[in-house]
Image (cartoon, rainbow, N blue to C red):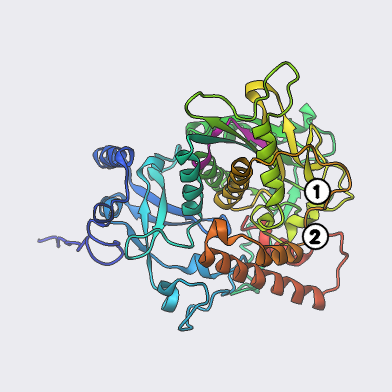
Amino acid sequence: MRIRSWTPLSEQGSVGRPSFVADHGLWDDAQSAAAAHIEAELDQVDLVRLAFGDPHGLARSKTLTADAFRAVLRNGMNFSPGPFLFDTGHAVAVDFLDADPGVGVGELTGAGNFVAVPDPLTFQILPGRTPRTAWVLADEYLRDGTPHPLSSRAVLRRVLAQYDSRGLAPAVGLEVEWYLTRRLDDEPGNTGNGFGQQGQAPRVAAVNAGYQFNLDAHYDTVAPLTDPLALHLLALGLPLRSMEHESGPGQVETTFSPMTALDAADAMLLFRTVTKQFCAARGHHASFMSQPAVDSADPSGWHLNQSVVDLATGRNLFEAEGPSGGMSPDGKAYADGLLDWARDLFVLSVPTVNGYRRLAAHHSLAPTRIGWRVEDRSAMLRVVGSGAGAHIENRVGEPCANPYLNIAAQLFAGLDGLVSGAAGGPAEPGELLVPQSLSESLDAFRAGRAAELLGAPLTACLTKLKESELSRYETWCAQNPAQPDRTTQWEQREYFGAY
């Protein structure tokens, strides 16, 4: 009996373009060397998840067989632009059927494919999975080999190139708060779901009562999940520092050692994705939504620590000379750049309707003032440490922000301050408040200078995505009067599961 032998046409179909990487010179020497190592070891892998971060900061992926990935590695893979077109509730926000989708990217017309090219430096085996599965991040390209104008990772790469041209390298540390809850059922939440209509959010219960900050006994209630999660993250190579119990019921803070900026953004995407998967597999639900509709929930934030190193000397530019400590003139100039750009780019740090609940004045430690202060947790920028450890902690971000855009916005604004060299003193009380709603933040984004960082196409795309999200929220509120200080059912459905 003859067994049929199938011969795949590996250079056609979903594969991007033959020799796409080589023809367009997309890799440096380190990436080429990593690719050769991957090819030599690929027999040890069954499946590969090819992922990239969409404009919302969510990981979108396709799972490939190891054999299929052999061709994709150097040729790229055709990918639908859907992740660029849908808002947070999967409503079509960019009209791809129009002759001009309105964002300055002609390839979006008719939802034409882009090419996702694996970055070999991000390839890693996911521990403890059967089948044996690898994860690799992709960079997005147009079909002519140029970086996709809507790529978040490309934005961060451009900013880092500006630092490198000046002999500088930013260092970034992540402090991320999130909620661990226990699932009450296995209902998928699909009833009533559709394009722009999210179904029921996961039904959960708190794992403890909360409101005993860093109480060791409260940590014991999350430790059965967070301790093995910590080991899992370490096995992924992430530079984990700590797991801590915060104030809210089941609220956890996870911190990481400083990293290069691109590594930090990649790590944030992987950390959030893996944490949700890890907890879900154990009957729990992890969410990076800032203010979930969980009784007595305290808002979660993402504190982004940043400093800049002079590559020639290895010196931290924020380090003040002499015994007085404090911030150097360069550090102050960097901080002033962050303040100058704060409103223009605020939506990149707090991109959801829900994230602004954390910034209300009644939260005692809310970073409500656009200013910088030494060791002041109510200011937007908190100056921390001295000497070689001096750094700035920006406290406004929400945990579900796009890591590439949030980090790029900080580094871009800070570099602008460094280049202009205008260094002021700490902001006094009474300075401008940070935006108090997505509507206010979006107005500042539209009227401001965001295109200098993002380019016109991504600025237009993000505007359409946020306008769609905000419009659906305001329509729901008009039909469902709610208490202004309470997280709405709309927010819970929109964000709690996805983020």
Give the total number of marks visible in the rendering.
2
Give the residue pinned by disc 1.
297
Q: Residue 289 at x, y = what percent?
A: 69, 53
Amino acid on which disc 1 is placed: Ala
Foreground: 443 or 70? Answer: 443
Asked whether residue 215 appears in the rendered view, the answer is yes
Callout 2: SS: loop
179 relative position to 8: left or right: right
Distance from disc 2 to disc 1, alpha carbons, whole Å, reads 10 Å
Q: 16 or 215: which is nearer to us? A: 16
| Displayed quadrant of residue 372 | top right
In the picture, the disc for residue 60 is: none
- 382 above or below 159? above
Crowding at dot 1, Cα within 10 Å, few <14 / some 14-19 / many 20+, comes out as many
| Few, some or many residues within 10 Å of mark 2 (<14, 14–19, 20+) | some
Instruction: Examine the structure image and report whether residue 258 is included in the region drawn in magenta.
Output: yes
Q: Are marks 2 and 1 in contact (CB under 8 Å)?
A: yes
Q: Magenta residues?
A: 253-262
Amino acid under label 2?
Thr
- Identify which residue is drawn at 74% across, 59% down: 354
Q: Which quarter of the rendered picture does the C terminus lie within?
A: bottom right
Quadrant the N terminus occupies: bottom left
Please give left or right for residue 489 compared with residue 228 in the image: right
Give the label on residue 487, or none: 2
The residue shown at (49%, 62%) is 150
Q: Is residue 89 visible?
A: no
Q: Which image quadrant is residue 201 in? A: bottom right
Where residue 243 sits: x, y (%)? 66, 32
